[in-house]
Image: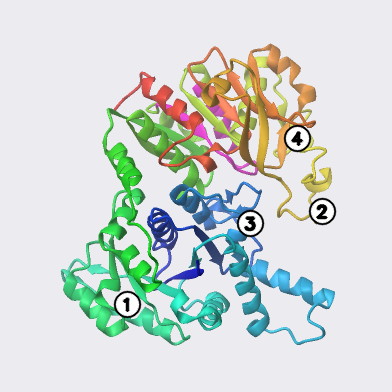
Amino acid sequence: MTKNYIFITGGVVSSLGKGIAAASLGAILKARNLKITIIKLDPYINVDPGTISPIQHGEVFVTEDGSETDLDLGHYERFIHTKMTFLNNFTTGGVYSQVLKKERRGDYLGATIQVIPHITNAIKERIILCSKNSNIILVEIGGTVGDIESLPFLEAIRQMAVDIGRRNVIYIHLTLVPYIATAGEIKTKPTQHSVKQLLSIGIQPDILICRSEKTVPLNERKKIALFCNVPVNAVISLKDVNSIYKIPKLLKNQKLDNYICEYFKLNVPEANLKEWQEVIDAEKNFNKTIIIGIIGKYVELPDAYKSVMEALKHAGFKNQIKVNIQLINSQDIEKTDFKILKNLNGILIPGGFGDRGIAGKLLSIQYARENNIPYFGICLGMQIAIIEFAQNVVGIKEANSTEFDPQCKYPIIDLIKNSHNTISKDYNKKETNISLGGTMRLGSQPCKLKLNSLSQKLYNKKIIIERHRHRYEVNNLLLKKIEEAGLQVTGRSNNNNNIVEIIELSNHPWFLACQFHPEFTSTPRDGHPLFIDFIKSAGKHKKKFI
């Protein structure tokens, strides 16, 4: 079957939800028995998002092959049942880095390196490389039309229509159609201007997806179609909804997939969205509501914990429990004497880096442990749980991580040793100029579970594979006293490194922490066993059901 490309751009403002729209469209097309992949092109100069603060860019999503990628790849995986790889996300910085390496090697035979054709060719090569096993390739262009940094990507996708044929390319433009409450009107002018800007660089959109507070009426859609030179049935209204999992059905109801299949002349069956209807039904059917506190340091931007929040919701679907998520700044806990924690049915501490807010997280774990509140620690949340137990139960008051105190007397948590991703101990010295990008234990790693442990019962397996993103590990040399005091190590890496992967407290209603990131593999249809049981336990916790 001929390969067909759908390029999705954004206009007017950023954060309109191109990633969700792309994932939802991908889900519908996959339900029509098409082989789908989705690529995210990010216009920033960073080689990957691994070194960007989550407050600026949201979470870093880790793929199975260990790539640090944009959070939209998490949406792609959750929506289309397909594992993403390093090929599915690249940045301007990554492209320029690749081209400059070739130039240094002399691959261009002395040519003057320019944005056109060298950078645009590199972009097209990456897109085509990722499309190898797919019928339809959705390509989301990050940023907003008009941004200077997006221009090489836009030029590359303009050229692709020439290279492979205009009938094998669809351009979708996602814009904002604002509702002016005081006038009681929906305004189409921003969309017209955005399309005009797209036309100025040689791209005529085939489909317009119009984000709006309310459904865009037919008259306004006709007006947009007339001024933007697209058929009225290719103007899709995407109103605000209370769940992202309703969007596939919303797009299908407007026959977006039919329009695309007819355009590409694809003879494929109708999409069956039964599984999405089941997700929507599960989201509405709940017996109780609980509050889960996520204790973090990047709470100003909820997207910093996007996969964790989605995994909690998925677990709620499976338990018929509505999960209200409360994002709590760990530094606030130090000032409020636990008052923020008293209404919680469960406490979760996710991954993070650096020493800011650690004291508040330690207090949160102590509070959960001593008051029998279900606790779930992920990555840093596991490391701090061990430190808290060592300090307050074992009595090793100076127990700490070398991440927070490089000279600590009892480094319960220390840098990873003997790994191909290991960085030098000199990382802790301020004068060391060492690369931080891609220097961690990343991607899927096997873990061996202790027989009859809670985690082994939940997974119902002896060996599991989960995704990692960490630079520090538990120091096995200092672990004996901690285990003797009652903290169980129930999962270890299934290799010679013997890294601690899961810990549990058996004398607690639910206290489990893991070094890996289970949130990355949770889906709205299946959930994840650890999250499902955590929410189940939180649902039994006696305090303050709503």
Disc 2, disc 4: CB below 8 Å?
no
The earlier-in-sequence mark between 3 and 2 is 3
Real-space Cα separation, disc 2 to disc 4, in angstroms: 20 Å
Q: Which residues are magenta?
A: 345-368
The earlier-in-sequence mark between 1 and 4 is 1
Question: Is 339 situated left or right of 130 in this image?
Answer: left
The amino acid sitting under disc 1 is: Pro
Q: Which residue is mark 2?
A: 431
Can see residue 219? yes
Real-space Cα separation, disc 1 to disc 2, in angstroms: 50 Å
**11 over 461 or under it: above or below:** below
Can see residue 296? no
Indicate the quadrant where residue 32 lies: bottom left
The amino acid sitting under disc 3 is: Phe
**Residue 173 placement (x, y as % from top left):** 39, 72
**353 over 88 or under it: above or below:** above
Callout 2 secondary element? loop
Q: Which residue is mark 4?
A: 414
Residue at horizontal 42%, vertical 85%? 199
Q: Which mark is residue 485?
A: none
Real-space Cα separation, disc 1 to disc 4, in angstroms: 53 Å
The amino acid sitting under disc 4 is: Asp
**Residue 423 placement (x, y as % from top left):** 80, 46
Where, quadrant-wise, is the C terminus in this rendering?
top left
Q: Which residue is mark 3?
A: 86
The residue mark sitting in front, 3 or 2, is 3
The earlier-in-sequence mark between 2 and 4 is 4
Residue at horizontal 25%, vertical 75%? 232
Real-space Cα separation, disc 3 to disc 1, in angstroms: 35 Å
Magenta includes 353? Answer: yes
Disc 1, disc 4: CB below 8 Å?
no
